[in-house]
Image (cartoon, rainbow, N blue to C red):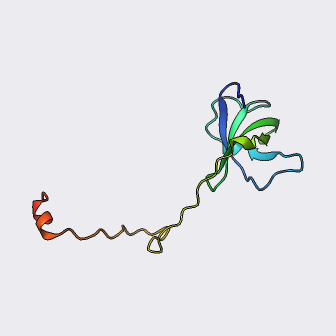
Amino acid sequence: MHIEGPIAATMPTDFSALSDRGLLKSSIAQTPFRRVPVKRGVWVLLADHEGNTCLGQVVQTKRNLVRVRPDWTTWESMPTITLPTSVRIGNTLPPQLPSIPSPLRAALPA
């Protein structure tokens, strides 16, 4: 694969919403950090809420909507992480640290 020019932007998308023509939709309005104007022919980085990414080429723009043809050879998927049962997402308490043996505790600065 050869990409000419910079990646224009990172655009949010839903990879499961692929159209019959093999295109994904994204909104320019949700893309605040654009490196170059998002127009037909430029490459963008598509990213979903699970951390999966893929490069795609813009094939159509209409107002704030962009249709992008993904290049599936660039697909990168976030690994599934299995957390220990003691870890809870959204827990505001810090994890319990192991106790320090008393000979080491005495050597620590106060």
Closer to the camera in the image, 76 or 60: 76
Q: Is residue 94 above or below residue 58?
A: below
Q: Is residue 59 above or below residue 78?
A: above
Closer to the camera in the image, 98 or 1: 1
Q: Residue at x 80, y 39 (%)?
A: 63
Residue 80 quadrant? bottom right
Q: Quadrant of the N terminus?
A: top right
Q: Is residue 20 visible?
A: yes
The residue furthest bottom is 85
Q: Is residue 3 above or below residue 13?
A: above
Q: Residue at x 64, y 47 (%)?
A: 76
Instruction: Give the mark count.
Output: 0
Residue 26: x percent and y percent?
75, 46
Residue 6: x percent and y percent?
65, 28
Q: Residue at x 74, y 30 (%)?
A: 42
Residue 61: x percent and y percent?
81, 37
The residue furthest right is 20
Q: Quadrant of the C terminus?
A: bottom left
Q: Is residue 28 visible?
A: no
Residue 108 horizontal side relative to residue 62, left or right: left
Residue 86 horizontal side relative to residue 56, left or right: left
